[in-house]
Amino acid sequence: MGKRKQRPTRLSDPRLIPSWIGIVLFWLVGQLPWNMLLATGRGVGHLGWHLVKKRRHIALTNIRLCFPELSREEQEALAKRSVISTGEAILEMAGSFSNHRINLDKRLTITGMEHIEKAQAEGRGVLLLGMHFNSLDVGSRLLGYGVDFHGVYRPNDNPVIDRLINKGRSNYMASSVKRSDIRQMVRLLKNGQILWYAPDQDYGIAHAVFVPFFGIPAATITATSRIARMGNAAVVPCAHYRLPGGQYEIEFGPALEGFPCGDDEQDTARINRTIEHYVRKQPEQYLWVHKRFKHQPAGQPKRY
C-alpha cells in the first residue's frame, strides 16, 4: 500500500491555491447588501437540495428520525427548508466575516440577558450552552454585540479555511479556545468570563455517552458538566435565530439549576433535552446536514 498523502499545513502550499481563490470569491460575495445576500443564499440552498445529494440524504435521515410524527411529505419539506437555510448561512458567513460596513446590531433583538447578569452578579463565570444552528457564524458576530465572550472551536483541517474562520470570528469575540484546551476554558470561567461551548455534534465515542436526542441515541461528550464543575460556572442556554426580513434574535435561557448533578449520563441527557427544546422553536435552522447519529450503541443499525 502507498503512503497516505499528508494534508497541506503551510498557507503557501500550492495545493491550497483553489482555497485561496475561493476566499477571494467569498470576500466579493460578502459585499452584497444584506437582504440580497440572504436571497442569494436561499438560491444556493435550493441548488444544494437538488445537487448535493449526500447532504440532502443526511438531512432527510435526521428529520425522519427526529420528527416521526410528521408525514413523509412534511418531513421532506422540513429537510428542504433546512438545506435552504444552510445556503443562507453560507452567504451570511461571507457577509459576517468580510462586510464590516453593515451594522447588524440594528437587526438584532436579545432576550434573556438577565440570566447572564444574574450569574455575573453572583461572581460566577458563564458557560454558554451553544447549539449548532446553521447561522453559527453570523451568530458569533451578533453575540459579540451583546456580551464579551470567548468561543470554543475545533480547528479546520484546511489551514486556509481555518485562518478565514479564526480571523472572521476574532473581530467579535475576545478569544478562540481549542476544544482540547480544557485548562484554558476552566481558567476563563474561574476568572468570571463568558465562554461559548457547543457539545451537540458527534465527536466520536471517546469521552461520550449515548443519551437521547429527539428520542434517538446520540453520542454526546460529557465535558460540559466537567467544565462547569471545574470552573464553578453557571450554564446558560444560548440560541440564535434568523427572523423574517433579515432580522435576528439571540435568546438566553435560565441557567440550569442543580447542574451538574454528579452523574455524567443524567447531566448529558439534560443537555440534549435543553438543546432539543430550543431546536424545536426553529427546526429548519438547525444543522441537520451533520451526521448527528453517526455513532450508535453496539447492536444498533447504522443510521446513514
Image (cartoon, rainbow, N blue to C red):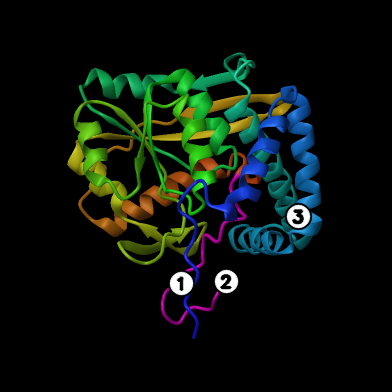
The span from disc 1 to disc 2 (Cα, nearest Å) is: 8 Å
Q: Is residue 248 above or below residue 136?
A: above
Is tag 3's residue or tag 1's residue first in the polypeptide sequence? 3
Is tag 1's residue or tag 2's residue first in the polypeptide sequence? 1
| Residue drawn 66% across the image and 32% down it | 27
Residue at the spot of label 3:
74
Is tag 3's residue or tag 2's residue first in the polypeptide sequence? 3
Q: Secondary structure at mark 3?
A: helix
First to last magenta residue range? 286-304
Magenta residues, dominant SS class: loop
| 179 in magenta | no
Give x and y (percent) for residue 113: 42, 20
Q: Amino acid at mark 3?
A: Glu
Residue at the spot of label 1:
296
| Residue drawn 47% across the image and 77% down it | 3
Q: Quadrant of the C terminus?
A: bottom right
Residue 258 visible in rendering: no
Q: Is residue 163 above or below residue 262?
A: above
The span from disc 3 to disc 2 (Cα, nearest Å) is: 20 Å
**Mark 3: few, some, or many residues within 10 Å (few <14, many ≥20)?**
some
Give x and y (percent) for residue 199: 40, 49
**Mark 1: few, some, or many residues within 10 Å (few <14, many ≥20)?**
some
Residue at the spot of label 2:
303
Label at residue 145: none
* Left or right of 112, for residue 119: left
Q: Secondary structure at mark 1?
A: loop
For the residue pair 234 and 103, the one nearer the viewer reads as 103
Q: Nearer the viewer, mark 3 or mark 1?
A: 1
Image quadrant assignment for residue 60: bottom right
Question: Do callouts 1 and 2 mark residues in contact (Cβ within 8 Å)?
Answer: yes
